[in-house]
């Protein structure tokens, strides 16, 4: 059973490594939600969450692998060193989750500012386009023609 316990600890360690990678990526991305940086920040926002989605997919695979491990027996559960290692890894995961939640709340506030700005920009663009099309002369546009009614 030592091999099973070690495999369990290794998988939990890999999961913590991936979670730490998500924290690093999120920390590296700063979002202000300010209009002058809007387009750049939206691109960065999308890229960040695409990377995080890929990491979460890997974490799901690790969770699936942990679920496939044979159940530990009573002697494994009585192993104090193993239990302490599991508790430390779970606490590390919880701490990472708390940090990610705080960063995501800040990112959500910036996202809402960016979203409002982009919606306003799209509305203005749509109104400008609609206004421009009202002043187009359909006979001057390519493909337009006069009908000859002298038949």
Image (cartoon, helix red, strand yellow):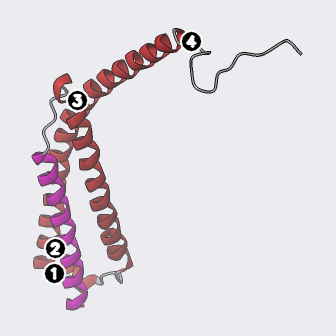
Residue at the spot 32% in from the left edge and 74% down from the top edge: 66
| Secondary structure found at label 3 | helix
Q: Secondary structure at mark 1?
A: loop
Q: Nearer the viewer, mark 2 or mark 4?
A: 4
Give the number of the mark in front: 1 or 3.
3
Q: For residue 33, what is the image quadrant?
A: top left
Cα distance, mark 3 to mark 4?
Answer: 36 Å
Determine whether label 2 and label 3 are within 8 Å by CB.
no
Q: Main secondary structure of the magenta part?
A: helix
Q: Nearer the viewer, residue 101 or 151?
A: 151
Mark found first going from the N terminus, 2 or 3: 3
Could you say which is closer to the camera, residue 122 or residue 16?
A: 122
What is the crowding at mark 3: few (fewer than 14 residues within 10 Å), some, or many (at least 20)?
many
**Which is more N-terminal, label 4 or label 1?**
1
Residue 113 lies, with reference to residue 67, above or below; the image says above
Label disc, if present, on residue 79 of the rendered structure = 1
Residue of label 4: 137
**SS for dot 4:** loop
Point out which mark residue 38 bears. Answer: 3
Task: Specify start and end residues of the magenta stretch as a single range.
Answer: 1-28
Q: Which residue is mark 2?
A: 83
In this rendering, the label closer to the viewer, 3 or 4: 4
* Marks 2,4: beta carbons within 8 A: no
Q: Earlier in the sequence, mark 1 or mark 3?
A: 3
Return the residue found at the far front.
150
**Between marks 1 and 3, how big is the CA–CA gap?**
54 Å
Q: Nearer the viewer, residue 36 or 136?
A: 136
């Amino acid at each position: 059973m030592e091999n099973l316990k070690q495999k369990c600890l290794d998988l939990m360690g890999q999961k913590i490594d991936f979670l730490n990678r998500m924290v690093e990526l999120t920390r590296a991305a700063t979002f202000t939600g300010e209009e002058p940086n809007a387009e750049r920040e939206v691109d960065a926002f999308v890229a960040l969450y695409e990377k995080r989605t890929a990491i979460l997919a890997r974490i799901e695979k690790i969770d699936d692998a942990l679920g496939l491990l044979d159940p530990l027996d009573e002697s494994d559960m009585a192993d104090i060193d193993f239990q302490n290692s599991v508790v430390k890894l779970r606490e590390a995961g919880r701490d990472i989750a708390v940090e990610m939640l705080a960063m995501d709340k800040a990112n959500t506030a910036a996202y809402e500012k960016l979203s409002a700005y982009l919606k306003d920009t799209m509305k203005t663009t749509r109104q400008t386009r609609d206004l421009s099309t009202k002043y187009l002369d359909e006979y001057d546009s390519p493909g337009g023609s006069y009908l000859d009614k002298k038949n």
